[in-house]
Image (cartoon, helix red, strand yellow):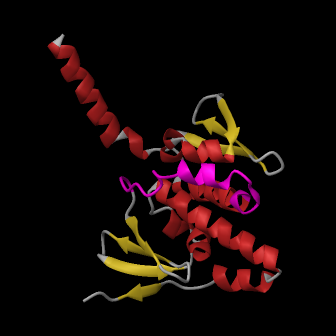
């Protein structure tokens, strides 16, 4: 009996160390009219259908998506939050989003202007950037943990929905092309 516990613990450690880094789910389909998303399990013919808010609330789905696709999902959720009447219920379920287990970059803060400050663990530098420009840069968004990428996507989707509803489409192009600023900390 004791040997079985040791073997189980060993396999769990192997899974956490090596296999967890590779995404299991991929976005297969997004239906904006019904606010549903379909995920495909990698290398299998298995599909999982759920609403945007159920997908974001399910930690196992978010953690097993690639960061780029997690940010796309977050963008759809952010746009849906602008028009949703279930906004408060959905926001209460999203308390897990700022986990940091896999990524090179880590979210540190969000300032009043809506910009996200993130920290590069390798170079030990902080950057400040708009969520829209982070999401549009595949290199940067792929360096975040999937849950943090989803959160950045939500911020970008909220901002995009706000800009589109105000009729300032020209501002979207400016935000997409904005360069990150280096923050010097003494």
Question: Where's the C terminus, which quadrant?
Answer: bottom left
Residue 95 sits inside the magenta stretch: yes
- Is 122 displayed left or right of 90 in the figure? left
Q: Which residue is most to the left?
A: 2
Please tell me in which quadrant of the rendered image residue 41 appears. top right
Say which residue appears at 64% left-offset and 37% top-offset: 40
- The residue lying furthest to the top in this view is 1
Q: Is residue 105 left or right of residue 155?
A: left
Magenta span: 80-102
| Quadrant that contains the N terminus | top left
Residue 159, given in percent of the width and then of the height, sits at 66, 73
- Tag count: 0
User: What residue is rendered at 45% in x and 63% in y?
Assistant: 143
Task: Identify which residue is drawn at 62% across, 54% down.
Answer: 88
Residue 108 picture quarter: bottom left
* Residue 89 image offset from top left, x and y in percent: 61, 49
Residue 56: % across, % down: 58, 48
Q: Quadrant of residue 98?
A: bottom left
Tell me, yes or no, whether the highlighted magenta stretch contains residue 70: no
User: In the image, 181: left or right of 122?
Assistant: right
Q: Is residue 117 above or below residue 183?
A: above
């Amino acid at each position: 009996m004791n040997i079985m516990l040791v073997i189980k613990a060993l396999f769990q450690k192997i899974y956490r160390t090596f296999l967890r880094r590779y995404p299991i789910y991929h976005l297969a389909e997004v239906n904006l009219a019904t606010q549903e998303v379909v995920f495909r399990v990698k290398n299998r013919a298995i599909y999982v259908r759920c609403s945007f808010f159920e997908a974001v609330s399910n930690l196992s789905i978010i953690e097993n998506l690639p960061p780029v696709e997690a940010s796309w999902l977050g963008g759809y959720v952010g746009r849906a939050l602008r028009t949703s009447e279930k906004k408060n219920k959905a926001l209460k379920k999203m308390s897990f989003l700022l986990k940091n287990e896999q990524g090179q970059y880590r979210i540190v803060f969000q300032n009043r202007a809506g910009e996200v400050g993130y920290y590069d663990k390798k170079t030990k530098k902080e950057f400040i950037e708009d969520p829209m420009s982070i999401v549009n840069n595949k290199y940067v968004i792929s360096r975040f943990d999937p849950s943090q990428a989803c959160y950045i996507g939500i911020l970008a989707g909220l901002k995009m929905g706000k800009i589109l509803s105000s009729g300032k489409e020209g501002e979207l192009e400016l935000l997409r092309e904005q360069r990150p600023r280096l923050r010097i900390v003494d």
